Image (cartoon, rainbow, N blue to C red):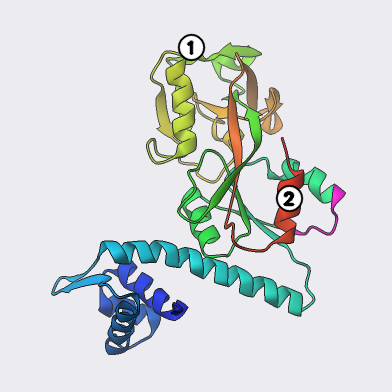
């Protein structure tokens, strides 16, 4: 038996909307047609996937398992379609890269210099958006820090960057060149992710705890901006991988953090897709 990707899309829509009526409107189907499609899928699978009630629909464990794998199957199918179209049209097979950090240009330079035929398409994404785009087959690879890979994705460690501390140029610490983490116990650290929901944020907080203190943190309102610029105009500081010294046109200063601490750079991708440019990237990029 072969699973029908359209029926899987129908199941995903019902689960996400929590209602056959809303899912039918989203899919531009009649409610009867959508209900029939789901029941046919349940017969093909051989077990109930949804529980219907007057309050809506509830996804049963079997349905949740199928949806989890269905998102991966759909992503693989979309990636295969994208590649076939590129080849058929004689187009350059671009490497669609999503990233959550700010070191991408530096990271790509040696690879594109050695392989000028590699054509990167750059897309900045928040972590949740990065996962969704990878699972949907809309990106070939995602670069991130300490993100736990979602079901169906593979994670490869490209290397580790040394962490430093950034402050605004008028911060009291800006005249320093070196700092230790325990010295910062009473400072406020800018973070981007919510503790407990961001692997990278949790990694940084753990570094502070290992240094003997519970850090004061504040989630920056400047989401999407490089960490080096977020400290400007504040009395807060931030972990960065930017080299020590003046930065951001002299508006920020980066202090060497001793003893050295590091943060990993990871690559996430759908493993069961063919992407020669991604293979080239993974083979040659190392920190």
- What are the residue bounds of the magenta stretch? 114-120
| Residue 285 visible | yes
Question: Regarding mark 1 in the picture, which secondary structure is present there?
Answer: helix
Give the x, y percent position of residue 157: 62, 39
- How far apart marks 1 and 2 lie (CA) works out to 38 Å
Give whichever of 186, 68 is nearer the camera: 68
Of marks 1 and 2, the one in the foreground: 2
Quadrant of the drawing holding the C terminus: top right
Q: Is most of the magenta stretch helix, strand or loop?
A: loop
Residue 63 higher or lower than 98, as above or below:
below
The disc placed on residue 281 is 2
Disc 2 is placed on an element classified as: helix
In this view, the residue in front, 149 or 250, is: 149
Residue at 70%, 26% (x, y): give it: 243
Q: Mark 1 — residue?
A: 182
Q: Which mark is drawn over residue 157?
A: none
Q: Quadrant of the N terminus?
A: bottom left
From the viewer's perspective, tell me whether residue 117 is left or right of residue 272. right
Q: Is residue 119 magenta?
A: yes
């Amino acid at each position: 038996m072969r699973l029908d990707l359209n029926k899987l899309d129908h199941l995903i829509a019902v689960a996400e909307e929590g209602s056959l009526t809303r899912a039918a409107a989203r899919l531009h189907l009649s409610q009867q047609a959508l209900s029939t499609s789901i029941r046919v899928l349940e017969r093909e699978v051989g077990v109930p996937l949804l529980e219907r009630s007057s309050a809506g629909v509830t996804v049963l464990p079997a349905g949740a398992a199928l949806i989890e794998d269905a998102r991966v199957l759909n992503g693989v199918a979309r990636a295969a379609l994208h590649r076939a179209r590129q080849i058929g049209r004689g187009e350059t097979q671009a490497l669609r890269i999503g990233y959550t950090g700010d070191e991408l240009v530096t990271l790509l330079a040696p690879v594109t210099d050695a392989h000028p035929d590699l054509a990167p398409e750059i897309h900045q994404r928040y972590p949740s958006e990065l996962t969704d785009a990878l699972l949907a087959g809309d990106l070939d690879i995602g670069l991130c820090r300490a993100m736990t890979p979602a079901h169906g994705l593979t994670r490869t460690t490209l290397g580790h960057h040394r962490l430093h501390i950034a402050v605004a140029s008028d911060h009291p610490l800006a005249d320093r060149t070196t700092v230790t983490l325990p010295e910062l116990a009473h400072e406020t650290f800018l973070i981007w992710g919510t503790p407990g929901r961001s692997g990278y944020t949790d990694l940084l907080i753990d570094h502070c705890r290992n240094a003997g203190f519970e850090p004061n943190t504040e989630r920056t309102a400047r989401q999407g901006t490089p960490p080096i610029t977020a400290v400007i105009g504040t009395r807060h500081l931030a972990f960065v991988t930017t080299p020590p010294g003046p930065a951001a046109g002299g508006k920020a200063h980066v202090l060497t953090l001793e003893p050295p601490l590091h943060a990993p750079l990871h690559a996430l991708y759908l493993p069961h897709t063919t992407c020669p440019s991604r293979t080239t990237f993974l083979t040659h990029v190392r920190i």
